[in-house]
Image (cartoon, grey):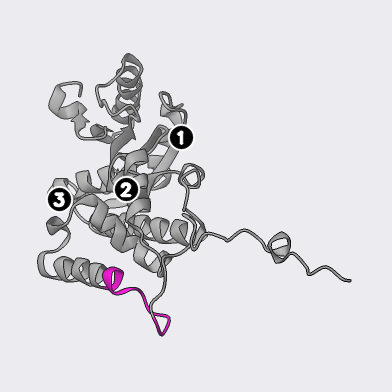
Amino acid sequence: MTRPRDTNQLSEPPLPIFTEAQPVPRARGDRLPSYLRDHRQRLRTRFMDGGADAMPDYELLEMVLFRAIPRQDVKPLARALLERFGDFNGVLSAPTARLREVRGVGDAVLVELKLIEAAAHRLARARVMHRPVISGWDALLDYCRTSMAHRETEQFRVLFLDRKNILIADEEQAHGTVDHVPVYPREVVKRALELNASALILVHNHPSGDPTPSDSDIAMTEQIATGCTALGLVLHDHLIVGKAREISFRAEGFL
């Protein structure tokens, strides 16, 4: 007589309904669950009514992530990114390789973050390029903060001005390590002559966050100032950008 098959031996253990990496459950009609739909709408409404100032960093970051991850709760990822990189600007400015280290960051998230960063840089740049720099000093500082404050390596830029102190070029002259960038005064002055510039503003960042000038910063600035004087160029200032503040060589008496 044939024995009945043991169905228990053939059955598989039940699988979990969801895992941490899977999207949240969808409502009928392939729509977001109401609690997520309502949460996103509340954030959008608050943003439209009060602007970015009405929202903490994690909620603003959530809104950036909505388009990249349309079917999942993005609040845990937003908080993880802020915990790793400190604040909203730090997340946007973080290198792609380091962003990928955060669980949940894929190509779609990277595109959204770097798109927002690029838009911020372009907007800040548009407010200073081909405009009088001296009368628009606050806009210039905003541009320098946006483009350099959260970099993880040192970058040295030169802003070239014409006779009316209008910014005609903004160029990266060198980039280096976390605490050093090689600068060649001769090349800085040579480039000014090539652009027919009349004045310069030097800018570099300190990834440590402390904008206090080093001895080498001071010595390098003196060399460039000497070269400018010899060729009839004006060195208006040297700005060092830190995480929360900037140092002006002119204001501090180094120029």
Q: Amino acid at mark 3?
A: Gly
- Where, by quadrant of the figure, is residue 207 drawn? top left
| Most common SS among magenta residues | loop
Is label 3 in contact with label 1 (beta carbons under 8 Å)?
no
Dot 2 alpha-carbon crowd within 10 angstroms: few under 14, some 14 to 19, many 20 or more: some
Residue receiving disc 1: 175
Magenta residues span 28-37
As rendered, which of 2 and 202 lies closer to the eye?
2
Q: Is residue 204 magenta?
A: no
Residue receiving disc 3: 136
In the image, what residue occupies the spot 25% across and 57% down? 60
Residue 147 appears at what percent x and percent y? 33, 46
As rendered, which of 226 and 120 lies closer to the eye?
120
In the image, what residue occupies the spot 46% across and 28% down? 177
Q: Using residue 14 as the reference point, say whether residue 159 is left or right of it.
A: left
Residue 231's place in the image compared with 65, above or below, is: above
Q: Quadrant of the C terminus?
A: top left
Q: At numbered mark 2, what does the secondary structure look like: helix, strand or loop?
A: helix
